[in-house]
Image: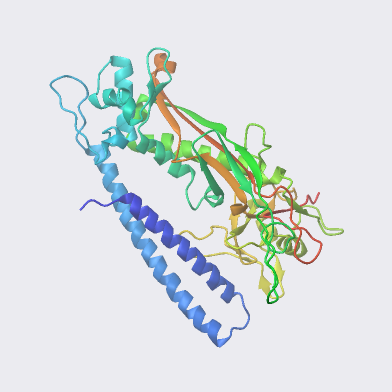
Amino acid sequence: MKVDIKKLRQARADKAKEGKTALEQLNALLGKETLTDAESTQLEQLEAKVDGLEKEVAELDKQIKAEETKTRRIALFGASTALGGPALATVVNDLNPERTGGFRNLQEFAVSVRNFTTAGIADPRLSAIMSAAATGYQQNQGSSGEGILVPAEYREQIWSLVFAENDLLGFCNPEPTQGNSIGIAKDETTPWGAAGVQSAWRSEGTQMIASKAALTPTLLQLHELYAFVLATNEVLNDAPRLQNRITVQAARSIRWKAFEGVVWGDGNGKPLGFMNSPALVTVAKENAQAANSIVVANVLNMYARLLDMPGGNPMWLANRDTLPQLGGLTIGNNAAWLPINQPLAGSPKGGMFLGEALQFNEHMQTLGTAGDIVLADLSGYALATQAGGGIDFAASIHLFFDQNLTAFRWVFRVGGQPYLSKPVQPAKGNNTKSHFVALATRG
């Protein structure tokens, strides 16, 4: 029976997400000094649930690994697909050749491109792609061509790697579009504000007063982001190395650059990052606070300025340079940072900080600089991307013919900005709140 590895990966992601929620609830209870009888019962149930989910995720990991091993072995040791010649047959190794062009993997496609452009060996599958404009394939070939567009399946593999669910980009709010820009209607009203949809008490017989949503139309422009990679023929002939050096590393680079724009982009030819957005709330340091330090009052004041909305998913983003400071913070007798020594797959690698997930990453600034630690709800960030995993992925040999290299080029468009144009006023009190809260420089 054929196993669908995509369904296995989706099932694993779902279980990991469920486990993350259960683990957060469990850690919240474990952090309490005393528990009620109901909470003790809930604690036992959560521990059993986390244990069960951990076993399910481990089993799914085992199945996924088995399928990946099987696929790798087929790519390494399977029968070679014949290239060219009227007497040789073409073997189609995929159940949906409209998406793969009949190629088993990206490596086989790349070798076919190389053989066609250097020796004129006409692989019938490649010829079908180049002449199949009706099915959505495009190509520009010849001595000045840009290359042959890679089949959809392998383009979408890159897309999936870039926008992995558990990676930081995956937490942003997607706004797909078929064009180069997208119009979104931003609603910056709050349930307690005077604008937008209102509710009211009514006495018997009195007339209802109508209200309407207060929407601000905004245009999100998509910007071009690319990766341009060269591969030697030795790499092309080695499927595992091609998968890692071309596919995985290109996706990792694109993912890094895209989220760097989400955090620090200036909005000129790139997304508007939340650290450069008027929506950012910056919490001042404490009086006489030592340089390059983080104290309990800092993080509590940051937490107090977070806009807590239904459906949100706040998390702490920090540079690892902050760890010696965070690890020493306590509130009463409780540690503010709770490392997860035996993490459930899919749980935050940085542990829990003040009850929220903590993610260490290199996008954040070094200790003592604004942006070294941020409390962010990335669901408050609109990330505009092309619908359907739109990405232009092409391979060509023409540019570096004399060096025996093949060029791979990925181009896709992405834009974004916070939904809020400025921090919002709370229902009670004077301190504004936002989806994004940073700590001021402590120099």
The residue sitting at 54% across, 33% down in the picture is 180
- Which residue is nearer to you in this view: 351 or 436? 436
Position of residue 256 measured from the top left corner of the image (x, y, whole percent): 56, 41
Residue situated furthest front in the rendering:
205
Question: Going by the image, does 287 lie left or right of 345?
Answer: right
Going by the image, does 274 lie left or right of 37? right
Nearer-the-camera pick, 328 or 421: 421
Percent position of residue 87, x then y: 12, 21
Q: Residue at x 66, y 62 (%)?
A: 308
Relative to 202, is 96 above or below? Answer: above
Q: Position of residue 271 (x, y in %)?
A: 62, 38
Kindly indicate the quadrant of the structure image that contains residue 302: bottom right
* Outermost residue, bottom side: 37
Image height of 297 relative to 67, above or below:
below
Q: Is residue 343 visible?
A: no
Spot occupied by residue 21 in the image (x, y as percentages of width and height): 51, 66
Return the residue found at the far right: 288
Q: Is residue 301 above or below residue 48?
A: above
What is the total number of numbered labels drawn onto the structure image? 0
Nearer-the-camera pick, 281 or 210? 210
**Residue 357 seen in this snapshot:** yes
Give left or right: position of 75 versus 169. left
What residue sits 58% from the left and 72% below the top?
28
Judge left or right: residue 192 versus residue 429: left
